[in-house]
Image (cartoon, rainbow, N blue to C red):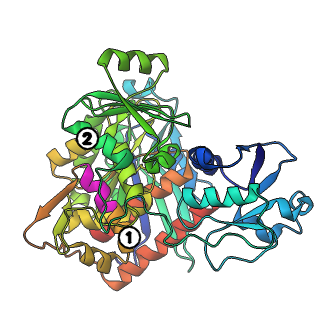
Amino acid sequence: MNKSEKIKFVFTGSVGAGKTTAIKAISEVDTISTEVKPSEEIIIKRKRTTTVAMDYGQLTLDDGEKIYLYGTPGQRRFDFMCPILTQGALGLVILIDNTHEKPFEELDYFLNLNSAFLQNHAAVIGITHFDKCAQPTINEYYQVLEERGDPWPVLHIDARNPEDVIILLETLLASLEYL
Amino acid sequence: MNTLKMIGFSDVEKARFSAVLALADPQLKQAWKITESVPADFYLIKERLITQMDAHEILKHLPRQQCIFIRRSDNALIVDGHQFFWGEQDVPSLRYLVEFFNQLSDNKIASSSPSPPENQPTPIFETSHFNPQQGFLGHLLTPAKTPQAFKLAHQHADLTLYVDAEQNSYYTKSTLEQLEPYFFATDTLQIANITAQQLLTATAGQELKAQPLTHLLWFTTFTCSQGKLIEGHQKGDIVQLKRWPNLNLPGCKRLVKLAAYMHSNAVDLDTVQASTGIPIAQIHNFYNACKVIGLIAHSQHTDVHEKTINDEQKQLLEKIGKRLNETLQLVA
């Protein structure tokens, strides 16, 4: 954590997992989103629009310093944005939609995509839409992480609920301090 | 019958108090009923409203002799009216509640209130260590030796809880917080073994979904420990968290830092306290809860994960944490 760098957290995960929603829930400014109609077949079924470049929101600390909140695009063809956005970030929030056909594959995908970043930084996993689908369970996600050798904490959250998003970030801070 | 209106309490707090009042019922000289209507015989008023009594449109008209003010500590504001010592815990002491409401019924309370009970919260287990094999938790843990399904009910309250020990699941209409008062009901719980078919019929009929028994075990242990270390743990034992507990459980979200530290380090609990600054009572509650559901590993050797985070970085994390907490207060 270099003082001259921006303080930023990056939200990543598949389309419809709630990245844009989570940032909007806590940003103190109107979030900037760059959206288009999705092109990938599988995405069209899930959402009418999707983020193409990134989402942006912010919070301000007591001393005036800003915390920047970035959301990566969900479509695979924009994956090249991820290492750009995570550069200099404090930590990563990976959101997984529990109603997805293959949530464990999604988790694997985003952990692998960001593996270089996660060598020296921390992540937290947020499982969304748990109210619509309670399987897989949190325990099952931990089993997947243990098999991978990843120590990251997992919580289920409602991305629309600011309290849930803040607890996710607080968990990330604790991971940054101790993991 | 005396009616009691609760003012300034959340739905969860009302449900908890109502449950404790139900537990107290056999010992009360008169029946008490929580009401939403006015007028009521008495008004139970949350401590944060005390300073608004003279200005609040509704509160200022309430007769003081019918007001019962909640006190959380011995240093609380002194005010005219009855004062009920709730203490710092989530539910009031059953013993104190019985004494207080019986005195109200007898009209013996005039200008003074009963002294706060000693040793708050009233421990349910009169030992220096926490024994998980007693009470409500004991009922949940016992079938681990002979897996079967059973039903827990309460003599005087509307509790129905089904446990499928074989599938490690439980079924109930209540949230974990709503079950809390029953954790301390040692004598009035009724337990009945049921067959798998009876369980299926009951849970299907009431549309109850299976929930992981580990959630109930964790929260029950966390609540009942009351700061005492679990039996069998020796001072100086080196321990580590094998896996994160379910951070969504009540009480757990606020101890994420403790979970992160114990996940990364194999140390004794005094070192955990010194390193994190978290009160030892909370560490004991958390440790006991994780131990009961098998999340604790014991080690012969200390293993401290030397995270390279300097003072400047630590201060930055604290500033960010403070800002997030401010946002949390605003949205809560």
- Residue B243 vs residue B87: left or right? left
- A77 and A15: which is toward the camera: A15
At label 1, counting other C-alpha atoms closer than 10 Å, the crowd grade (few under 14, some 14-19, many 20 or more) is some
**Residue B292 falls inside the magenta stretch:** yes
At label 2, counting other C-alpha atoms closer than 10 Å, the crowd grade (few under 14, some 14-19, many 20 or more) is some
Mark 1 residue type: Ala
Whether callout 1 and callout 2 share a subunit is answered yes
Q: Could you tell me which residue is drawn at 75 percent across and 77 percent down?
A: B78
Q: Residue B281 carries which label?
A: 1
Mark 2 residue type: Thr
Which range of residues does the magenta coloring cover? B286-293
- A172 and B73: which is toward the camera: B73
Horizontal and vertical percent position of residue A147: 15, 45
- Is B71 above or below relative to A109? below
Q: Could you tell me which residue is drawn at 71 percent across and 70 percent down?
A: B113
Residue indicated by mark 2: B142
Cα separation, mark 1 vs mark 2, equals 26 Å
Q: The disc numbered 2 marks a residue on which chain?
A: B
Q: Which mark is residue B269?
A: none
The overriding secondary structure of the stretch rendered in magenta is helix
Quick one: SS at disc 1? helix
Q: Which mark is in front, 1 or 2?
A: 2
